[in-house]
Amino acid sequence: MHTKRNRERIAVDVPVVVTTVLDSLEGRIIDLSEGGAQILGCTLPTRSKCQLDLDGHIVFGTVQWSEEDRIGIRFPYDLTDGPLYERLEQARTAKHSSITLQPSATMATTGSGFGRRAD
């Protein structure tokens, strides 16, 4: 059963170290929101407690799902600051600034195309 997410997931590429009581694994966050992350390159059992280390800043999480080469982590508290939050905001800004103008807006400013001319 899938539930609707209330946070926008943003594609990122952030190297992190995932640490549990027994192990320390390197992975890459490929999908991030304030509430969690998808990490490629490591696997842990579902419901495992772990911490993500990015540049010495620690974020705690719980494994929600696990596949052969990736895991989904849920954060107990929303990201609101720190290096991981900054990466999320940078990626979000880049995503939203890459949206191009609609053709009608471009035509109105250049005076070309169909319809009324803006002379």
Image (cartoon, helix red, strand yellow):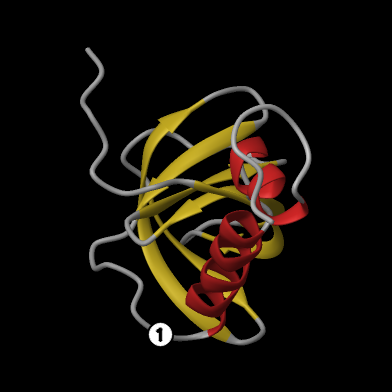
Residue 83 lies, in percent from the top left, at 56, 82
Residue 18 in view of the camera: yes
The residue sitting at the front extreme is 119
Residue 11 lies, in percent from the top left, at 61, 47
Residue 95 lies, in percent from the top left, at 62, 55
Nearest the camera: 58 or 103?
103
Q: Is residue 44 above or below residue 2?
A: below
Q: Amino acid at mark 1?
A: Asp
Q: Is residue 37 above or below residue 50?
A: above
Residue at the (67%, 64%) spot, across then down:
16
Q: Quadrant of the C terminus?
A: bottom right
> Within 10 angstroms of label 1, few (less than 14), some, or many (20 or more) residues?
few
Q: Quadrant of the N terminus?
A: top left
Residue 100 in view of the camera: no
Answer with left or right where residue 57 lies relative to residue 25: left
Answer with left or right where residue 87 lies relative to residue 77: right
Residue at the (23%, 44%) spot, across then down:
6
Residue at the (66%, 63%) spot, across then down:
94
Mark 1, residue position? 81
Residue at the (77%, 52%) spot, across then down:
110
- The quarter of the picture where residue 50 lies is bottom left
The residue sitting at the top extreme is 1
- The quarter of the picture where residue 3 lies is top left
Answer with left or right where residue 5 lies relative to residue 38: left
Nearest the camera: 2 or 110?
110
Residue 111 lies, in percent from the top left, at 75, 48
Question: SS for tag 1?
Answer: loop
Q: Is residue 36 above or below residue 83?
A: above
